[in-house]
Amino acid sequence: RLQLSGSLEKIMPQNIKANYLADGWDILEIDGHNYQEIYQALRKAVNNKNSPVAIIAQTSMGKGVSFMEDKFEFHGMPLSLTNVKLPYQNSVLMTT
């Protein structure tokens, strides 16, 4: 897992889930790239009337873009025109 400038273990080594659990929160861990899981977690959180809910969404920086995926160097950095075009050149775009 990554943070803005490096690995989660180096930047923020505490156990966030354990901190919330210790404070009485319910935790929902999801794949943050899965829209169905996001929707279901939000529904569960809204319907939970017993305790606050934290949704921990596991994501990958640059997901689906091979030269960016899991590379913190691209976080918050504008792409060059060449790099902007690369994901589109490497995929098949379908139109209807």
Image (cartoon, grey):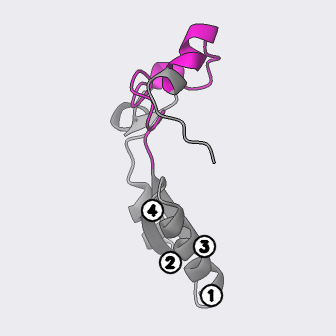
Give the magenta range: 59-87
Quadrant in which the N terminus is drawn: top left
CB within 8 Å, label 2 to label 3: no
**Residue for badge 2:** 24
Q: Quadrant of residue 65?
A: top left
Q: Residue at x 62, y 24 (%)?
A: 76
Q: Amino acid at mark 3?
A: Leu
Residue 48 to residue 16: above or below: below
Seen at 49% across and 21% down, the residue is 89
Per the image, is 60 magenta? yes
Q: Nearer the viewer, residue 88 or 71?
A: 88
Mark in front: 2 vs 1? 1
Viewer-proximal residue, 14 or 40?
40
For residue 19, which numbered disc appears in the image?
4
Spatial CA span between label 2 and label 4? 9 Å
Residue beneath disc 3: 42
Farthest residue to the front: give it. 96
The answer for how far apart the CA atoms under marks 1 and 3 are is 9 Å
Mark before the other along the chain sequence, 1 or 3: 3
Residue 3 % position (x, y): 47, 34
Q: Secondary structure at mark 3?
A: helix
User: Which quadrant of the view contains residue 46?
Assistant: bottom right
Tell me which numbered mark, 2 or 1, is placed earlier along the sequence.
2
**Which residue is the site of mark 1?**
47
